[in-house]
Image (cartoon, coloured by chain):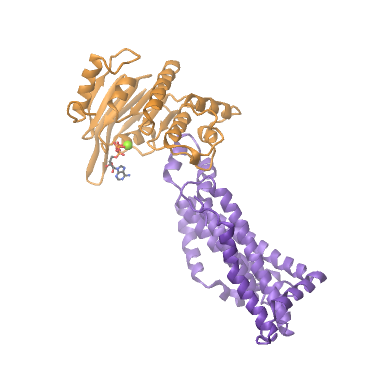
Chain colours: A orange, B purple
Amino acid sequence: MLRLRNLTRSFGARLLLDRLALDLAAGERVALLGRSGSGKTTLLRCLSGLDPLPEGCKLQAPGNLAMVFQEPRLLPWKPVWQNVALGLAGSDARMRAEAALAEVGLAGRAEDFPITLSGGEAQRVALARALVRGPSLLLMDEPFAAIDALTRLQMHGLMERLWQSHATTTLLVTHDVDEALTLADRALVLAEGRICLDLPIPLSRPREAGTQDFAVLRRRLLEALGVGDGEG
Amino acid sequence: MTAAPASPALRMNRLISPLVLLACWQAASSAGVLPARILTSPWAVLQAGWALAATGALGHHLLVSLARVVVGLAIGGSLGVAFALLAGLSRRGEAIIDAPLQMLRTLPFVGLVPLFILWFGIGETPKIALVALGSLFPIYLTLFGGIRGVDRKLVEAATIFGLGRFAIIRHVILPGALPAALVGLRYAMGIAWLSLVVAEQINAGAGIGYLIADARDFLRTDIIVVGLAMYALLGLAGDALVRVLERRVMRTRPGLIAS
Ligand SMILES: Nc1ncnc2c1ncn2[C@@H]1O[C@H](COP(=O)(O)OP(=O)(O)OP(=O)(O)O)[C@@H](O)[C@H]1O
Ligand SMILES: [Mg+2]
């Protein structure tokens, strides 16, 4: 599905990604964690084709990928539904956009302009914009970071439903260890330019944060992130 | 967002000092301190304006001047937009277009009047050409800057969502550059009026400039003031028009102040 080899990226003297390799199986949902500035966004930019691939790097990725950026990146001059329908062809674009908006809990805001949305609402519009095109690869850069805890739970439910109906291969960047353990089949930790931990999450769904197995995995992730016990 | 509109009371306050000035002017004229040969009274100006309007002469000259500005602005604006698109959207276009335009810009363009008369004669062409030339630069400069200032992140998002080059120009770059271009339009209108005043000194047979020159020959300061007032009114009207446009555009924009 997605295959990346030998990605090296540096800014100035600083080596950010060091001969990085990454594989995603079809339908797999992978969480990517790492400290701030570890290069997660940079990795996504290379995967999405926004940044040119450096010499010697090999990438196979599907053409119809969608991305949720770390910021909403909505066009201020277009109403919400047109932002969601951006680049969609066909006369049913508006209907599809409104359906996607309803899924993220924003039915009825279709005609509003982005300036009238809260940060979390704008981010959900960005999510709808990615989902509406039924991508085979979904790259998400901390999509739920700006969303309140309750809505975030709803969004997690939405992602689960999405994955049940279309097995969308997903790479989800998050700072939230619990979010990774709740949503992903596998968690990767990026540090020093390499994937320093590749942790399968064999928990059955739906997942409970309180269980013993969850706590064990949680500790391993936190350790790899360099955070002591009990924090997070 | 936009500053809160001034309260009616504040707006009234702003009217007071111009009205007082006007009253002083009228008083000075009536008392004979200000002879009509220098400047006629506001009342006499109003009467002269009314008389000119009644014969249809004022309307005629106004339309002639307006047409020169509109045609000149349209030509200069179109060229400015075309140059800005070429230079703003491609590095090669910038290399070819920007340098000569920046050089021309430093030339005080009203200095070109003698050349324009040699090239275009003394008819409508040099007048329209001067207005066009004057309004070209502000449009070019602001739109070029606006295009280059469009948020890269929005362009990236549009790229990811499959928009082609032309769709990105249409849906992202041009709307993003619009506020800057409107500021340019306002500058351009100001310069267009200025160019018109200069251009209409070139042997005009009609238009507000002609009206003023003709009045000068007959020592009619009242008609001269009427002509000046017409220039001012047209300038204000143009400015108001762009402000309305700006307000509509800015309605949906975050963090931009409509001035
Ligand atoms: N275009 C660039 N030019 C110079 N430095 C850059 C550029 N892009 C990113 N960097 C640097 O690379 C480092 C990693 O950036 P990146 O955005 O990938 O981090 P991140 O892991 O996504 O962090 P966060 O969790 O805070 O989003 C940062 O130190 C950043 O300053
Ligand atoms: Mg980031």
> In the image, what residue occupies the spot 32% across and 20% down?
A182
Up the image or down, B26 lies above or below A48; here it is: below
Residue nearest the observer in this picture, A57 or A230: A230
In this picture, residue B135 sits left or right of residue B122: left
Q: Quadrant of residue B199?
A: bottom right
> In the image, what residue occupies the spot 67% across and 62% down?
B70
Percent across and percent down for residue A34 are: 26, 32
Up the image or down, A95 lies above or below B1; here it is: above
Q: Quadrant of residue A197?
A: top left
Up the image or down, A98 lies above or below B71; here it is: above
Q: Residue furthest left?
A: A228
Residue nearest the observer in this picture, A93 or A124: A124
Percent across and percent down for residue B85 are: 53, 52
Residue nearest the observer in this picture, A68 or B90: A68
> In the image, what residue occupies the spot 63% across and 65% down?
B235
Percent across and percent down for residue B6 are: 55, 57
In this picture, residue A111 sits left or right of residue B92: right
In which quadrant is the N terminus of chain A drawn? top left
Q: Residue furthest top?
A: A204
In this picture, residue B102 sits left or right of residue A13: right
In which quadrant is the C terminus of chain A drawn? top left
Q: Quadrant of residue A186?
A: top left
Q: Is residue B78 something that shows in the picture?
A: no
Percent across and percent down for residue A108 are: 55, 30
Q: Is residue A213 something that shows in the picture?
A: yes
Give the quarter the ligand 2 occupies: top left
In this picture, residue A173 sits left or right of residue B5: left
Q: Residue furthest front?
A: B9
Number of marks: 0
